[in-house]
Image (tube, rainbow, N blue to C red):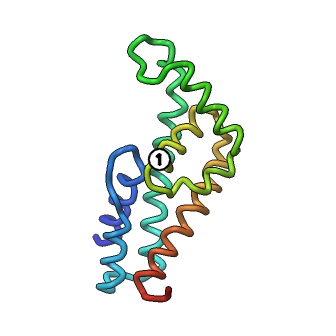
Amino acid sequence: MAYLSLFLSAFIAATLLPASSELLLTGMVANQSGQLWLLWLSATLGNVLGSCVNYYLGRQVERFSHHRWFPVSQNAMGKARGHFQKYGSASLLFAWLPVVGDPLTLIAGVFRVKFGVFLLLVSIGKGLRYGLVIALALGLF
């Protein structure tokens, strides 16, 4: 049950909803609430799948972008496209960052980054982040 709770927490944290899974993971590591590699895997998988939801939503944005009620102007979309193209798909390695990471995964969907590239880069970044959280919780740093 602990792994499922962590998975769901990480999943929600990766969507555009405000949430954090790092505190739960840190507490679980400190309380020895499971095997470290399974805690890492649960958090990483949940967070990556949550990012995939953002990616999918981003892929659907174009269908609605020409409606008057759409919250982002064409000008703002153009600026976002320019910034994303300037830094490239490699910026997805930073999808774990607070505030900018979740919208970054949405933008990757909007701009049609190849899903395999998206999945690889997001998984690496988020996996490394959760590895660091575990290492910090264990007092290795």
Residue at the location (53% across, 62% down)?
126
In the image, 26 versus 45, the foreground residue is 26
Residue 30 x/y as whole percent: 33, 84
Q: Is residue 20 above or below residue 103?
A: below
**Count of numbered circles on the image:** 1
Crowding near the residue tagged with mark 1, few <14, some 14–19, many ≥20 C-alpha atoms within 10 Å: many
Left or right: where does residue 67 sit relative to residue 123?
left
Label 1 sits on what residue type?
Answer: Asp
Residue 101, position in %: x, y?
A: 50, 50
- The residue carrying mark 1 is 102
Please state the horizontal and vertical placement of residue 138, each as a whole percent of the image.
42, 87
Q: Position of residue 114 (x, y in %)?
A: 68, 41
Depicted 51 relative to depicted 140: above or below: above
State which quadrant residue 33 falls in. Answer: bottom left
Q: Is residue 11 left or right of residue 2?
A: right
SS of the residue under disc 1: helix
Residue at the spot 46% in from the left edge and 43% down from the top edge: 53
User: Does residue 45 sit above or below 139 in this rendering?
Assistant: above
Identify whether 73 is placed above or below 16. Answer: above
Question: Seen in the image, is 60 located left or right of residue 11?
Answer: right
The residue positioned 63% from the left and 33% from the top of the image is 111
Q: Quadrant of the N terminus?
A: bottom left
Residue at screen point 39% across, 44% down: 16
